[in-house]
Image: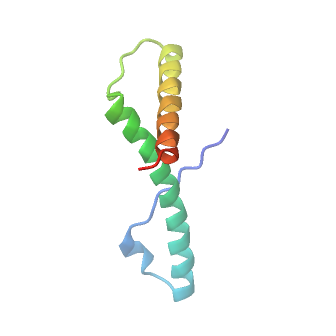
Amino acid sequence: KHIRYKINRRPSQMKKGSARSQAQLKRREHEKSSVRAKVEHVFGVVKGLFRYRKTRYRGLRKQTAKLNMLFALANLILADRRCLPA
């Protein structure tokens, strides 16, 4: 699978161009930011709640399995938070 990395532009770079192109650019930047925000919540749970900040070299298989499990649990926790009333 090919991953496309998308980096948001700085606000000073967005002011160049016509009003129409600025609106399109702003919409595109908003789409990128919304995806990043969803992903960063999961990382916040893994690093904050599970205290997974450093990794030791144990082998790629073990590390991959551990990270897959942590991210699956983080997704379940975030889904549970959305379902429960505040």
Residue 50 as seen in the image, left or right of residue 60: left
Residue 70 as seen in the image, left or right of residue 56: right
Residue 38 is situated, as x and y percent measured from the top left of the image, at 49, 50
Relative to 13, is 20 above or below?
Answer: below
Q: Residue at x 34, y 32 (%)?
A: 49
Q: Please say whether residue 65 is visible from this viewpoint.
A: yes
In this rendering, the count of numbered labels is 0
Residue 1 as seen in the image, left or right of residue 47: right
User: In front: 77, or 54?
Assistant: 77
Residue 83 is situated, as x and y percent measured from the top left of the image, at 52, 45
Residue 3 is situated, as x and y percent measured from the top left of the image, at 60, 44
Q: Residue at x 57, y 85 (%)?
A: 20
User: In front: 26, or 39?
Assistant: 39
User: In front: 65, or 77?
Assistant: 77
Residue 25 is situated, as x and y percent measured from the top left of the image, at 53, 74
Relative to 50, is 33 above or below?
Answer: below
